[in-house]
Amino acid sequence: MIGILKAAAAIASVGLLAACGSGPAPGGGSGGGDGGQLTMGFSQVGAESGWRTANTKSIQDAAAAAGVNLKFSDAGGEQENQISAIRSFVQQRVNVIAFSPVVRTGWDAVLLEAKNAGIPVILTDRAVDTQEKDVYKTFLGADFVEEGRRAGDWVVKQYASAPGPVNIVQLEGTTGADPAIERKTGFADAIAANPNLRVIASQSGDFTRSGGKQVMEAFLKANPKIDLVFAQNDDMGLGAMEAIEAAGLTPGKDVQIVAVDATHDGMQALADGKFNYIVECNPLLGPQLMDLAKKVVAGEPVPPRVVTPDEAFDQQQAAAVLPDRKY
Ligand code: GYE
């Protein structure tokens, strides 16, 4: 029901966008180069996590700072809403379309429509799988396999001298999403270094706090001994933390928590000793996205892939950097 409501709200907001898109239509290719204001259509995944909220704010703030006219659409986590939003941007003849794809597959038709309309597309945050040629100009975002691998490397070091099996459970992100697929791959690669490290259960918590909590409750019921949770984002880790506490156990001690993102709430939990390690994924992509968009619209070359660098934090490091964190 909530899903349907969200979908309806997202469709309504796309309709609204279409209705107010009747100002001086810049048209594909006419903006940016002629002194006119550049118009960007941006389709966001939704508002599932602290990471996403920070990402949305970064894009909106950077657009305002760069003088970009941003048409922002929130898909409420539904691919079909993203497809309608992108179609609407094509119809409005925005100068450039950017989007963060909820899942990796199923984009070919709409990407071809944008290409045939001569409107450049930039992927931000997440990649797509496509066989089509030249359907996007560049992909800006983190290396998710590397993030998973860094989380796994820490686990390997932590349990280097474990005498017996270490029971790990994994909270996966949205099924079919690029970061869920790649963080899982990177983590599995890294922990393969020690056969004592076993993933005894792995399930999607949809990158949300409530999803992480629910799945963790089920994991705790089904498994008498869980040593460590690998949460593919902070929000699911925070949900797992609540479930662990509700089960009378101490997060960070009885059950260790390793997560990805390094949002404010995650870093606070780490500084408080309730998380054990976080690999950062920087959501502040707005300024780079606006630069790339201006170049693409001006016909200047851009690299096909722009990787954003990430750090990683243990408890002491989190406490030290927390006051200066920007998200
Ligand atoms: O890690 C998670 C969000 O795509 C990198 O999506 C992003 C992920 C992020 O919901 O918190």
Image (cartoon, rainbow, N blue to C red):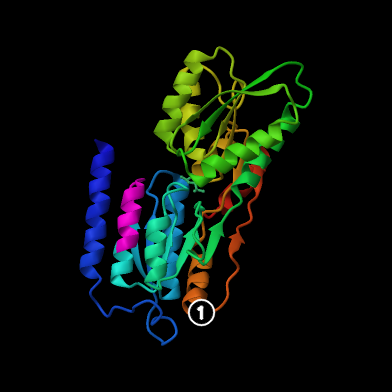
In this figure, which residue is indicated by the disc labeled 1? 299
Q: Is residue 204 visible?
A: yes
Residue appearing at x 48%, y 70% in the figure: 290
Residue appearing at x 55%, y 79% in the figure: 300
91 w.r.t. 139: above or below: below
Secondary structure at badge 1 equals loop
**x then y, percent, for residue 321:** 62, 49
What is the three-letter code of the residue carrying label 1?
Gly
For label 1, the crowd category at 10 Å Cα-Cα, with few meaning under 14, some 14 to 19 and many 20 or more, is few
Residue appearing at x 64%, y 36% in the figure: 187
Residue appearing at x 51%, y 63% in the figure: 133
In what quadrant of the picture does the N terminus appear?
top left
78, 317: nearer the viewer = 78
307, 61: nearer the viewer = 307
User: In the image, is 148 to the left or to the right of 128?
Assistant: right
User: In the image, is 150 to the left or to the right of 101?
Assistant: right
Residue furthest to the right in view is 161
212 w.r.t. 59: above or below: above
**Magenta residues (range):** 74-87
Q: How many marks?
A: 1
**x then y, percent, for residue 102:** 42, 48
User: In the image, is 308 to the left or to the right of 51?
Assistant: right
